[in-house]
Image (cartoon, helix red, strand yellow):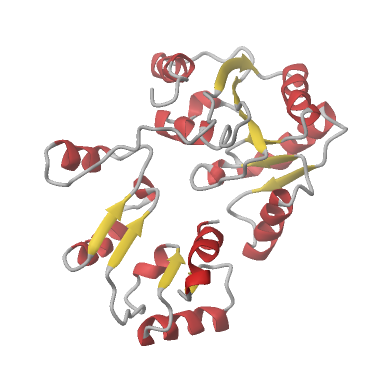
Amino acid sequence: QHYQALLERFEPFGIKVALLSRFRTDRERKEVKVGLKSGAVDIVVGTTGVIGRSIKFADLGLVVVDEEHRFGIRQKEALKRFQESVDYLALSATPIPRSLHLALSDLRKFSIVATPPRDRLPITTAVAQFSLDRIRETLLRELKRGGQAFFVHNRVATIQAIAEKVRVAVPEAIVVVAHGQMKPKELEEVLVGFIKRKAHILVCTAIIESGVDISNVNTILVNRADRFGLAQLYQLRGRVGRSHRRGFCTLLLEEGAALTKDAGRRLRVLQDNTALGS
């Protein structure tokens, strides 16, 4: 999606934009690497492979790191070598404590994008026990207004069984499944098909947590929400309500399961803080 957005914005000006990820063939990746080394490629959008030692840049001037909180220690170390010589911009809706500390102690300059996009509405957030009736009611409401929905279940071992329950609850809908253990080509086909509205509901793991921007998806259900961290839940909720339509987030809990004190606090924070910027 970043690649498509940059293509639309920069190609009319003769700026060459390339994509480097596991969804590209070996030949395509090789062509991008050659283009970066020669300077034929002006902007490259990529996964962490872009920071590998095998990538050579003709004249690198700017590094933008999106979803910085998703990067591990080794990747952060690899990124440090860029920070010493080029302009560096890190973006995150949920910065990790270290990045936040660097910003608040003035060791790193920071700015806050506090103004929501035009026509953006707060996301209605609810906590409920898992039940097929509640799932059907929530998903049908979205389908009736022509929208799509995410159903997040973060265990690959049981995701197909959960998808079957969703199909039983909403037989009118086309339900597809996506998770990180799928073959790249298969995963890409499912996601692209969903973006093209060939399915109504995507049952998936937390792989949609960052970066996914589909304006027609405005309802999300998170199963066993008590097992997610606050930052994860905040990111997942942010996948909906990204257009002028009202977004709905339902945090599902296992029926009869005891909530820990911390899990209860996390869910309460999300319920209480729904206003934009809160």
Q: Is residue 130 left or right of residue 29?
A: right
Q: Position of residue 145 (x, y in %)?
A: 77, 29
| Position of residue 250 measured from the top left corner of the image (x, y, whole percent) | 61, 22
Residue 234 or residue 2, whichever sits in front: 2
In the picture shown, does residue 235 fall above or below 66? above
- Residue 73 in view in this figure: no
Horizontal and vertical percent position of residue 36: 39, 80
**Residue 206, above or below 234:** below
Q: Is residue 85 visible?
A: yes
Residue at 40% of width from left, 13% of height from top?
Answer: 261
Is the residue 113 above or below the residue 223 in the image?
below
Hey, which quadrant is residue 96 in on the image?
Answer: top left
- Figure quadrant of the C terminus: top left
Q: Is residue 89 left or right of residue 177?
A: left
Q: Quadrant of the N terminus?
A: bottom right
The quarter of the displayed image where residue 139 is located: top right
Furthest-right residue in view?
A: 172
Which residue is at a point 32% across and 76% down the rendered structure image?
A: 53
Above or below: residue 240 compared with residue 210 = above
Residue at the farthest front position: 13
Who's the residue at 73% across and 23% down the image? Answer: 135
Q: Position of residue 210 (x, y in %)?
A: 48, 45
